[in-house]
Image (spheres, helix red, strand yellow):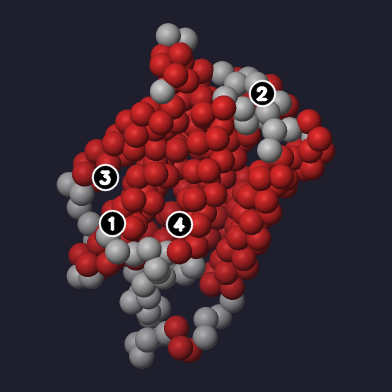
Amino acid sequence: MEALLPVLRGYPIPSVLVCALLFRVVDQLLQKLPVPKVVQQDKFHSWRWRNLSVSMVHSLITGTWAVTCAVVWPETLQDLHLYQTPLSYLLVCVSTGYFMQDACDIIYRGHARGSWEFLLHHVLVLSCFLYALCTQKYVNGAVVALFVEVNSVTLHLRLLLKLAGAQSTPLYHINKVVNIVTYVIFRLFTQFYLTWFILHNYAKLDHAGFFFFCMMLMNIMIGIYLYRLIRSDFFIRRKSNITENGTHNNNSRKFLTD
């Protein structure tokens, strides 16, 4: 790993492109796995299932990786500006590659309009992560930001279950509770800590204004998403969202907000 780090640092953009290609390979491999019949009946839902599956792989890997970095190296949580390890730098490379691949997949498949909020999130993340990789600053900030991927696992599972028409299953009801808990712990608390760190060290940080702006946009977005999650999973849906037979209408082309 120590020998690999100079290569990654010396060629951050090519390293990210290689990671993006690896996630493209994951995408192709996942297409060989069986898909629920209800998903296969709709072209958009089929693509969405595949896209979410790749996202699930990314979340499982990077969420576990980020938390492990913080446990093994406590300095990860203390110095978000300058401290880094070879594994933390590699983690940011891998995650940046995923976000680049996913943004390209959404645009290439023609779903940019329906998932513009998701693309905005990707642009914010990519701008911050690429800055960290190219300047070798804020690498630990990116690692801590990836704590949110722990919650993304339950978020993706929630959407996969909805695509499969499994909203009435015990797994869905358990997951929706776990999802809110992990949302608060790994997403809200993480965003709060990152925002606090920037404000507390504002005068000492490079380009603090840019990162504070990105963080405030992200804070607004996660607040809106939390409201939508609670409204969708814990309150009675409006009649317009229910089909004649009482099931949820899965024909929505909204990628993120349902």
**SS assignment at label 1:** helix
x and y percentages locating residue 110 in the rendered image:
30, 64
Amino acid type indicated by mark 4: Leu
Specify which label sits upstream in the sequence, 1 or 2.
Answer: 2
Residue behind mark 2? 82
Give yes or no for contact between labels 2 and 3 (Cβ–Cβ under 8 Å): no
* Residue found at the very far left of the displayed protein: 32
Label 4 sits on residue: 119
Q: Nearer the viewer, mark 2 or mark 3?
A: 2
N-term mark: 3 or 4: 3
Residue indicated by mark 1: 108
Crowdedness of circle 1 by 10 Å Cα count: few (<14), some, many (20+)? few
Q: Amino acid at mark 3?
A: Asp
Q: Are marks 1 and 3 in contact (CB under 8 Å)?
A: no
First-in-chain label (1 vs 3): 3
For numbered disc 3, what is the local secondary structure? Answer: helix
Closer-to-camera residue (48/250): 48
At label 3, counting other C-alpha atoms closer than 10 Å, the crowd grade (few under 14, some 14-19, many 20 or more) is many
User: For this view, does 163 lie left or right of residue 80?
Assistant: left
Q: Secondary structure at mark 4?
A: helix
Query: Relative to residue 14, is residue 193 depicted above or below?
Result: below
Q: Name the residue: 42% across, 9% down.
A: 3
Query: Residue 114: x, y in percent?
Result: 40, 69
Which numbered disc, 3 or 4, marks the residue closer to the eye? 4
* Residue appearing at x 46%, y 15% in the figure: 5
Q: In the rendered image, which residue does mark 3 sit on?
A: 27
